[in-house]
Amino acid sequence: MNALHPKKLLLTKWTAVHPVAKQKHFLVSRVIQPELPTDPIESVEIEAVFSKATQVIAWRELQDDQVWRQGWV
């Protein structure tokens, strides 16, 4: 997988390898900024395309090919 940078994740599309509750297509809707600007970004909010449900995950989870595929597959 290509190297990801958390600041470039906003509005990227992702497909869950193992859908949960029929949710498999997601969009990064927000990059959560740390309290201190010098701290690294750790989390993003992803939104299910179909239900609009959101959840916060560690952005590094998106690098796991066993869980996520970049783009809508």
Image: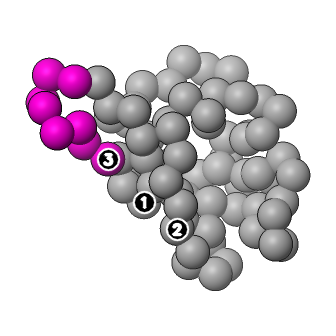
Which amino acid lies under the numbered mark 2 shown in the image of this protein?
Answer: Thr
Residue at 70% across, 62% down: 25
Q: What element does badge 3 sit on?
A: strand
| Disc 3: which residue | 32
For discs 1 and 2, the disc positioned in front in the rendered view:
2
Q: Residue 11: in sight, yes or no? A: no
Q: Which class describes the residues within 10 Å of circle 1: few (<14), some (14-19), or many (20+)?
A: some
Majority secondary structure of the magenta segment?
A: loop
How far is mark 1 from mark 2, CA to CA?
8 Å
Residue at 12% across, 30% down: 37
Which amino acid lies under the numbered mark 1 shown in the image of this protein?
Answer: Ser
For discs 1 and 3, the disc positioned in front in the rendered view:
3
Q: Is residue 35 magenta?
A: yes
Nearest the camera: 7 or 45? 45
Please tell me how many numbered marks the rendered image carries: 3
Q: Do callouts 1 and 3 mark residues in contact (Cβ within 8 Å)? A: no
How far is mark 1 from mark 3, CA to CA?
10 Å
- Mark number for residue 50? none
Residue at 52% across, 68% down: 54
- Mark number for residue 29? 1
Residue stretch rendered in magenta on the structure: 32-39
Q: What element does badge 1 sit on?
A: strand
Q: Residue 41 appears at what percent x and percent y?
A: 32, 31
- Mark number for residue 54? 2
Q: Residue 13: in sight, yes or no? A: yes
Q: Quadrant of residue 22?
A: bottom right
